[in-house]
Image (tube, coloured by chain):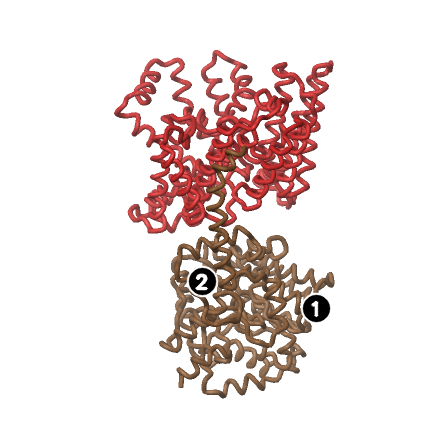
Chain colours: A red, B brown
Amino acid sequence: MKFNSVEFFIFLFLVFGILWRFNKSLKINNIILLVASYIFYGWWDYRFLFLMFFSSVVDYLVGYYMPSSKNRKLLMGISLSVNLGLLMFFKYFNFFLESAHDLLHNFGYQGGFTTLNIILPVGISFYTFQTLSYSLDVYKGKLKPQKDFIAFLNYVSFFPQLVAGPIERAKAFLPQFLSPRVFSYPQAVLGMRLLLYGIFKKMVVADNIGLRVDAIFAQPNQHTGLELIFGLSLFAIQLYTDFSAYTDIARGVAKMLGFELMRNFRTPLFSKSIPEFWTRWHISLTTWFRDYLFIWLAGINKKSLSWRIISTILLFLIIGFWHGANYTFIVFGLLNGLYFIPRILSRKSQKMRSLLSFLNNNSLISKPVVLGNFLILSFTGVLFRSNDLSHASTYYQAVLNQDFFGLNDFILAILPLSLGFMIFEWYNQKKSHPFDLDGYPTWLRRSLYVIMILAVFLFGYFGTEPFYYFQF
Amino acid sequence: MKQFLKKTWPYVFIGIAYFLIGEYLLHRLNETTSIKEVARIQSSSKKELYYGRQVLGNSLPLYKYTLFERLQPEVLVVGQSVTLQFRDFVFEPFQDNFYNAGLMIRNLADLNYLADLFEQGEIKNPRFMLIAVDLSFVLKKTFLDEYSLEFDRPEDRALNAKSHLQGTQKLMLDAKLRELPLQNWGFGKAGMMGRGYRNDGSYRHLPEIERYLIDSTYHDGNLIDRLKNRQAPFIVPFEYDPEKAKRTMGVLDRFTKLGIEILLYIPPYSDAFFNQAMEDTLFSGFWKEYMSFQQELSDKQYAIIEFTTPSRMGLDDRFMVDAEHPGEVMSALQLKKYCDENRQTPSFLHHLKFTTLDSLLQQENTLPISFLKDSINLRFKSKEK
């Protein structure tokens, strides 16, 4: 069930009503929530439910037996094998098979091969990481195992964030299923506001931009250099608005149901450097990798600067690969890793430190730096959007080779909306959320709500465009 | 909770009110009739009815498949849009047991699926099939291969809430669309406007006919520009795929083994387009191989209406709807010519009479682009006089 579908709104209306109506018993409330989450997920394909249930049961049992077990490493190994195994099989099996075939082909192997017709279960990259974090925390002794099976199943399957995050940590999220929930008017209002903002961002901004981006990326050779630069910049905005819209809706719905989800974005497109960008973009994923992989990896040789660079590049290669089984994501990860080198060098070079500090803090230069950083992100994002490396290469070449000037009306028409949106976010970036309207006069707030609702109906995209991150 | 509901209700009401207004408008324009219902009425009615939705969209492969499944005709036409001008009366006396399923099958995989359906007995075998083997069946890369009748059949947009919201959006933003249709029969506004799919599955090109009556010259439809700009269907690599050609023959064999008599159809191009296109090395390189494929089919004893252009038939480009779509008169003449020259195979063709066709060809109202046979065209007949 997609957030931007009519079914979802009917579903949400029912869940909201039933959940608060039967809020007298926490156990019943949790069971209702679990049923709702499984209906939500099974709406895509009921077969995916078995997979999620299996993954949940494995981690519940691993956690359950971990404290009393003499063989904790074995249990952790089971959790890692099951979760990463599922991910590898469903997401990467064909990629590895094809890559092996291509490699053998280069060495003269002429035989054929068969790929499996595997459907990627929606959200598998997100919920496997969530369950894995639970087992890892229990293993490290940071978290006590959860005995309440229903609460644990809810932790894995909580429908607002199941499909595209935020990837919640058990420590902050699981306790929310264990204490009685009380309806809070300000929370519910804030939830509705986030929901409206998310829907507006997705249907009006992201999807309308996406139509242009699709057209430009489909035939890069048919566009001028300027259109191609707009195309890649628009894609960066599309990706941000699309993904952050999902998070806004997830957080909004969670609030309406009495839950708190972590913030996943802090206006990342206004970052002054790539390292800063990664602290503001998909925060739940980057902190996951930092806590469970990077700290361990970098700790192997703390004193060596080169090892720090290597481990950072390795980290971003993995982050890139997490996004999908395609060489484009690997190169995307590699580039992002390389962008970290100046900051790593600044740890030991005073000159580098001064330069970075100047770029970040000088009031005259910091805004052009934001723009420059945005362009670097956008150019790198071509890899993220392209079907394969050759497609990305065609795009980059076309930027240089095509006639530069000229902008067609179809692309031009989206610029006021894109710019208007970015300006709105720029002025609200310091707030707890860009759509935090506290302090606005009531009439203005209400007018904004009505305008946004009408804008969704009149200018929203009602096609079948899914959220971009669903593919991961 | 009460306070929350009280405060949010007006905003929810805006959404509900908008939805209800939209539903009223869509219903008023006959856009909401489901395909199942359209198929039920079209398949049982003798009245001319045109299916076409301008606001919600046609869900075309589903529409065609629903009628095909319902009718399970003895005479079946399949292929891309180039087949859509084969009309029922051309296959006299089988006009009541005929269906033109043009655009139901979009690629080789779909054709293969059709063979599966016949083999598994899910659909009764037709006696005779006319199959258009256009260039997409042997092209290495074509967007048409992304469609799948088996796995990705479009849903009926009349039954999809999101499509209704999309339709309402169009109606709200374009006042012209809200005008009520002049006729009170047919389906959807597109049908009323004259574009649409007839009961026999063929397609009615009213705007092109209207244009022809004002200015009876040939219109290319920008195909030559698309070739120059390497746009669909001429997207690079515009290459012949021998593997695909082999697979196409394999699927055709399956129909033959089922005892279905087949007549293959290599669609024509207008002279204006074809002559210019042959000067383009990309096109001519591919064309040479495509014609070898046609020869190969012929050598394998497949009955085949070979590639032609209007001038090769003693006609001119006005018999084409555009550069790649033959008009209904030309399509009928192509079939008749084939029968006159090769009536022995397939044997089914022995049964065809062409009485209605011959009589229509004699009528002075018949234009190169159209027989002007539909009653809705009567006003044009008077104009012509």
> Which residue type does callout 1 highlight?
Asn
The chain letter for the residue carrying disc 2 is B
Mark 2 and mark 1 lie on one chain; the one further toward the N terminus is 1
Q: Read off the residue under disc 1.
A: B125
Residue A81 place in picture, x, y as percent: 67, 27
Q: CA distance from mark 2 to mark 1?
A: 37 Å
Q: How many marks?
A: 2
Secondary element at image label 2: helix
Report helix, strand or loop for mark 1: loop
Does residue A364 sit above or below B366 in this rendering? Answer: above
- The residue pinned by badge 2 equals B283
Q: Position of residue A228 (x, y in %)?
A: 36, 44
Quarter containing the C terminus of chain B: bottom left
Work out whether A30 lies above or below A242.
above
Q: Residues within 10 Å of mark 2 (few under 14, many from 20)?
A: some
Image quarter hosting the N terminus of chain B = top right
Nearer the observer, B319 or A283 = A283
Q: Nearer the viewer, residue B100 or A155?
A: A155
Which residue is at 25% across, 25% downward? A364
